[in-house]
Image (cartoon, rainbow, N blue to C red):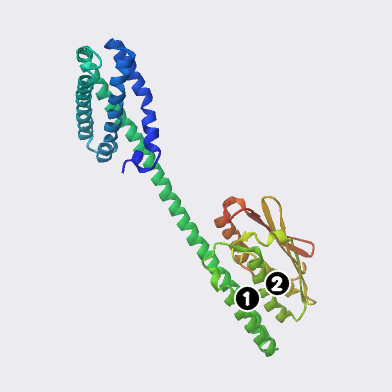
Amino acid sequence: MHPVLARKGRLGLYLLAWIPPAGILYAVLSAAASLGRLETAAVVAPLALAAAFLSLSTWYLCRVFPLRSPRVASLLAAHLAAALVSGALWVFLARAISAAYAPLFAGLEERLAPQRPLVFAIGVLVSLLAAAMHYVLLAMEASRDAEAREMAVRITARDAELRALKAQVNPHFLFNSLHSISALAGSDPARARQMCVLLSDFLRSTLGLGEKASIPLAEELSLVRSYLAVESVRFSGKLTVQEEIEPDCEACPVPPLVLQPLVENAVRHGIANLLEGGLIKLEARRSARTLQLTVENTFDPEAPPRRSTGRGLRNVQDRLRAHYGNEARLEAGARGDCYRAQMLLPVGGEEP
């Protein structure tokens, strides 16, 4: 369908755009044919209206012969033929209009007759200008379609990346948890069984997260608490958790399990190396445009570092980049006997 006719309101704007060409035609005919104002308006108004609708047909010719077509000769011939036909139709319409107004305006037909070549030339010129305008519209439409396709490809690629990154979270956590259970299986089977039950409850609660782009922070914190309940069994009360969560933060959307790798690292590389256990502190603060999430843990700076691939932090960084672009960031580092990982997320939606 012609883009002018595709949406309501466009036809009105299109007809309004014909006022300047009609004004030019009015001035030309008024001067060349020595017509009065009313006579000129009576001829120009229906002629311009008919020409406006006639020019719409040029769209379909432009679709058949695009500018990048290798058939250049055919393209030029087609538009030249269309312009000549348009000019002839203008002459025919001008004659019909002047004949219809003959009883009202004496001698109108005789005064317009010498101007038929001029009317023909204007009709040819308007047809060629209409073709140029429609080629511009086609180029704009092609550009919008290309942008839409590019955006669709980017969204598809981003969604695939997010799914791949989310798929890494549970296996990474599961590996760490099974390692903890295996450590308890020989020394304390009862606690190992308790960890298995808590682990199964935690995994069950994460089953529905695969298709979600974001969840409320309150739900994310609930998952973190479930995980820490698993680890608390292993550490027999040596793991202390402290929370400072501002109430207005809990409804903010965050990517699912985005805190999970940070809390795992706090346990595995911090608390696990402390003989007397340690503290994990969770903070959530909100400003006008930013949600600040912090995971802080005590650790032994002199303890030999555990073997690590850094996959947890990389996963969080990659997910934030895929989800928010450059609008979010992760900062992590140690100060004294405290390790701090802090995320800054934009507030106000799932995406920036």
Residue occupying the point 34% across, 40% down: 5
Q: Write down the residue under mark 1.
A: 176
Q: Write down the residue under mark 2.
A: 267
- Label 1 sits on what residue type? Asn
**Residue 52 locus on image (x, y percent):** 31, 30
Q: Is residue 240 above or below residue 99?
A: below
Specify the label residue 29 is tagged with: none
Q: Is residue 183 above or below residue 130?
A: below
Q: Is residue 24 left or right of residue 186?
A: left
Q: Is residue 327 above or below residue 134?
A: below
Q: Tags 1 and 2 in contact by the CB under 8 Å rule?
A: yes
Q: Nearest the camera: 15 or 71?
A: 15
**Residue 319 locus on image (x, y percent):** 57, 60
**Residue 277 locus on image (x, y percent):** 78, 75
**Residue 154 locus on image (x, y percent):** 46, 53
Quarter of image, res 96: top left
Q: Is residue 150 left or right of residue 234?
A: left
- Label 2 sits on what residue type? Val
Q: Nearest the camera: 223 or 322?
A: 223
Quarter of image, res 140: top left
Question: How many dots with numbers?
Answer: 2
Residue located farthest toward the front when viewing the structure as drawn: 103
Say whether residue 79 is visible: yes
Q: Quadrant of the N terminus?
A: top left
Q: Nearest the camera: 96 or 162?
A: 96
> Which of the two labelled residues, at mark 1 and mark 2, occupies the earlier sequence position?
1
Secondary structure type for disc 2: helix
